Image (tube, coloured by chain):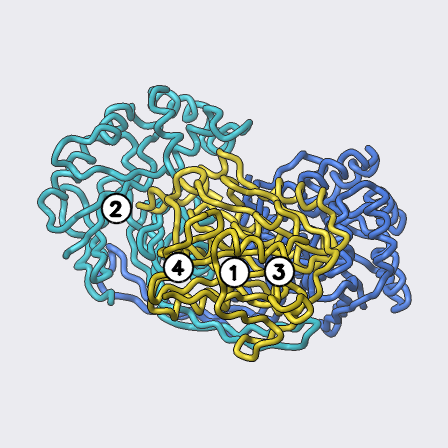
Chain colours: A yellow, B blue, C cyan
Amino acid sequence: MGSTWLISGSPGCGKTTWILNTIKNHQGACGYLRLAEQAESDHEQLAVSQIDYTFLKDQIPHLEDFSDCRETSISQHKDFLTLIELSQSQSPESLGTIGIDSYAKNRLESLKLQPDRHLHFGRDSELPNNDTLVFNKLESWRLNLASSVWDPQSLNTFWFELVNGAYGDVYRAKALMNLPDGQSIFFNWIVSQKGSQFLPLKTVSPPNGRPERPSGIVIQGKGLDCITIQSTINLCLLNDALLEMHQMPLRDRQPEVLHAS
Amino acid sequence: MKHAVISCLHANLAALKAVLNDIDQNGISDITCLGDLVGYGPQPNEVVDLVRERAITSCQGCWDEDIIEGLNACECSYPSQLAEKRGHLAHEWTAEQLTDINKDFLASLPTSIRRDRILFVHGSPNSQHEYLLPDMNAFAALERVEKAGADTLFCGHTHQPYVRELKNGSIRVRLQNTSNHNAEDKEINLPMRKIVNAGSVGEPRHGSTNATYVIHDDVTGEVEIKEVAYDIGLTCQAIIDAGLPRIFAWRLSHGFEFAEQAEDASHVCER
Amino acid sequence: MIERWALVSGLKGDLETYELIQSELKKARGVTALFVLGDMIGPERNCDALLNRLQNPRRKELEPQCIYGWWEEQLLTEQGFRGEQKADTLRLNQGEEVVSALLNAVDPSHLKWLASLQFGFIELDCGLIHGSSADVGDNLTSETSPLILLDRLTRLAINRLFTAHSTKQFHLELTGGGIDSQVKDLNGQHQHQQKVSKQSIIGIGAGASYTIYDVGSDKTHFLTAGGQSNSKGKGFA
């Protein structure tokens, strides 16, 4: 008989990081499911969970994803650990005996998953206690960036401007971005924590045109200037010719050629 | 006698007025400008008018040159695609705004000004586009001043004011060539030279939003770096009123350059 | 493994000398690469045969890796490959006849290949350029101010610069020295002493004078095709 844990907490409290570490330290196989309160819009929910899941799957290739699956019987195996991530700002106690909202509860029932532990950030002392913010009534904006590749320096500038408030008060930004050398970088930033997290995925695409894998950005905040964010991103993305210019030297390194300045 | 050196005004009228006011209060009438009167900022004509009205001796910066001759800087002088696209946008806007008289004035500016053993340039004696950063290889920096036949070199372009003294230099070499089978050792001693960067009036990048310039005493050789506060709100509003990208106002009000500077300090575009 | 490079320049259409060098390289041990640092062409003779050979090396012959030199730059400029400029420096210094002679010396069918050549190569920590990082016509000799030499090395962040434009053969090593740098800015004052690190400039010669560089031992051997070694090539640690 496997175990099923429900991990809940506010956005940005560190659920994904804690889950990643827990899975890494677990001996047996693991499954993962990300749930959200009904309050979150479905599209944006999908974008965030895709970014998180792609990142987790990259770090732990054998991870079982239950998000769009109806068959969870594998979780019954001995040593199998299922971790359910639930984005929930309210404390479990305020939501009655079961501790989660009815939307999440129905999802769990339909997947035949019954948590035998519920850990909540801010309540249970075995979880790290990070400062979090109340994310009610925030605007959010997302962009699918599949097959888009960034000019690396432009990405630096854009991210710096974004998290420093050039396009409105950003509370949280999460993204997976493609670089011309085939790397995909997981970006994670929250206003209450110092600095951005930049984690390159282990999986690197060959420098051969546009990579086929999930990529996108989700931003939450107030007074977001979405039109300018979108137009700035457009100025940062490489066209085919420039992408080829970046990738060509990576494919054929020898000998290094000097151009007249 | 004391004289003031200003650089990189970047069409920021409020900053230029504040700096000129500060220079006046120091009782200095001799002012040299190291170029980039325009570019990014919202008041190119007003700034050029004021420089002409005050009869400020000026050399030409890379922006001034590009506005006259069309975009001359190669893309590689921009650190990123984003910076390049923003730069082109600012270029087109500025070229459209500038009056013919002011364009002629910018075209008439010399690339360097020499006063005895003092040389004034925008970037470096090699190029208006070359950055002489304070941490540039000391020998390479000395080579720039030495090649120009100067004791003191005044430059701008980096938007970071500094005074750099290069002294007690020597290089030892060992030579072997075909006509001489024995290695020959020699040592040369290098002269002392000084590089003064005047910072930026209109687009500071030294960590604060204040305008900077320098005062040089040509008798004692002393250089004082001056920092002058000005009403940034005025310039930011002018940027928005002019229809320039809002991000320029945001960057200026946070003490960042409109576009980041090229990473490779020694990069020279020789086109 | 022994790795040695042969460095050649200034052939100016002289196929005979090129063949002689190739035959000597065949006999020399461990030469793994042949770099031709420009000036494959010149106004003195027709250069087509040499250009054909460089583009179509014979079997069992070291394949040349070519970059463009000062004469190629003049031809390409005159032929409109450098924007609107013409070879005015050449015209001014050597006259219209030399410009015409250069145009006549190279069949236009070679222009595409010449235009595709690079300015230089970086191999290991070595720069291989016709002139220098500053200019294809940079005339570096053993008499050039060490300050300028140091600058040319610094521009590319390399430890050895192989140059050809001066046509001279020399190996000049920067062995020591330093400079004090004092910077004052709005944050205060900082002192810094910069040392000269061990770096070299090597003039590879031109025409029949060529150079073999032993990568492992960092030794240069100055040779003349058809003649003797020009130096014992000792003493360069």
Q: Which residue occupies the foreground of this view, B213 or C77?
A: B213
Residue A232 % position (x, y): 66, 44
The residue where tag 2 is placed is C7
Looking at the image, is B254 positioned above or below residue A254?
Answer: below
Find disc 3 in the rendering and name its residue: B150
List the residue tagged with mark 4.
A75
Q: Which residue is mark 1?
A: A198
> At numbered mark 4, what does the secondary structure look like: helix, strand or loop?
helix
10 Å crowding of disc 1: few (<14), some (14-19), many (20+): few
Q: Amino acid at mark 3?
A: Ala
Q: Position of residue C131 (x, y in %)?
A: 40, 46
Quadrant for residue B256, please give it. Answer: bottom right
Residue at disc 1, secondary structure: strand
Element type where label 2 sits in the image: strand
User: Do callouts 1 and 4 point to residues on the same chain?
Assistant: yes
**Amino acid type indicated by mark 2:** Leu
Residue at 62%, 54% (x, y): give it.
A103
